[in-house]
Image (cartoon, grey):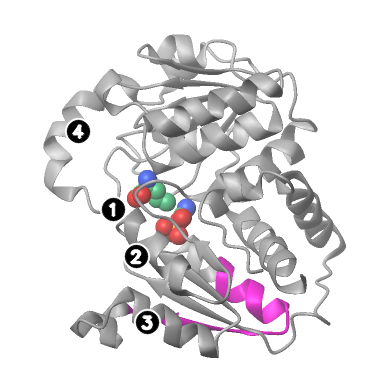
Amino acid sequence: MKRDIISVLDMKDDMSEIIDLAIRMKRDRYTPHEETRNRVLGMIFEKPSTRTRISLETAMIQLGGHAIYLNPNDMQIGRGETIADTASVISRFLDVISYRAFKHENMLELARYSSVPVINALDDREHPTQILADFMTVLEKKGKYRDLKFSYVGDGNNMANSLMLGAALLGIDISIGCPPKNAPDRDLTEKARKIAKDNGSTVEIMESPVDAVSGADIVYTDVWISMGEESIRAEKEKLFGKYQVNDDLVSHADKNYIFMHCLPAHRGLEVTDSVASSVNSVIFDEAENRMHSIKALIYTLLKS
Ligand code: CP
Ligand code: NVA
């Protein structure tokens, strides 16, 4: 049976193994490719991408396969062919499909009609492949998952949803500081809390960014205006002013805290230059880890 990665929850049984494999691949500079040679990935991107696209494409090359970039405007989907028909057709050619979508419903539709694995390369609900790189970076920098406080400050968006689920699966305490009306998805919060409880950790959501960051080992933020939200820019920038990750805010974190961001960053908005470029910042290691972790994920999906 094919295995889709639409949510972080689709890695609930092996997220930690995929991360360990990514760490080994990075350390040993070795990519097994016997089982992945000549396999083809189709990458549908409805929105821009730097890291995810290059990670996917590089990963496929190193795995001995190939990746095809598919812009919906250049496909018949842009002229009205349905997602269902598109999925049914392209999965006859491809071994795996990645999809960056505006709408989660479209992601589900594509996965439903595709006969090969579908990887969510970001939608309005989650960003599961980013989570692999993020917790890989935490493990590299902190040497463990347990007994860490992970804080996320800003918009309760796709990143917050996925980070919350990932932290819960790995037993990391997570504190999210956000405006109440921009809290993470309610259904996913409930799921994350249930998983966290079983794993002896907590998921806390609070209004105060200072409380969220207090004593934190990791301080994470993301853009205030996600792709597709440009029309509500002014309103959101006003609402999020006090959630900026700046020197004052990080002074409440543990002195050995690391700063993380999925990128792209808007320096001067959600994070200041002084924090993003500080010695505590690990954003470029985190970005590099997108490639190692996506490679480990694709290998895991294709070898089985
Ligand atoms: N973090 C991330 O997904 O970056 P891109 O939008 O550049 O792919
Ligand atoms: N929340 C951001 C993440 C970008 C990687 C967005 O959806 O645009």
In which quadrant of this rendering is ligand 1 seen?
bottom left
Mark 1: secondary structure: loop
Residue under pointer 2: 48
- The residue type indicated by label 1 comes to Met
Q: CA distance from mark 1 to mark 4?
A: 13 Å
Say which label, 3 or 2, has the lower sequence index.
2
> Tag on residue 121?
none
Q: Is mark 2 within 8 Å of ligand 1?
A: yes
Q: Is mark 4 within 8 Å of ligand 2?
A: no
Q: Along the horizontal axis of the image, is 157 left or right of 160?
A: left
**Label 2 with label 4: CB-CB less than 8 Å:** no
Q: CA distance from mark 2 to mark 4?
A: 21 Å
**Label 1 with label 2: CB-CB less than 8 Å:** yes
Q: Tell me if I can see residue 264 in this picture.
A: no
**Quadrant the C terminus occupies:** bottom right
For label 4, the crowd category at 10 Å Cα-Cα, with few meaning under 14, some 14 to 19 and many 20 or more, is some
Mark 3: secondary structure: helix
Q: Which residues are magenta?
A: 55-71
**Label 1 with label 3: CB-CB less than 8 Å:** no
Mark 4: secondary structure: helix
In x, y percent, where is residue 125?
A: 39, 46
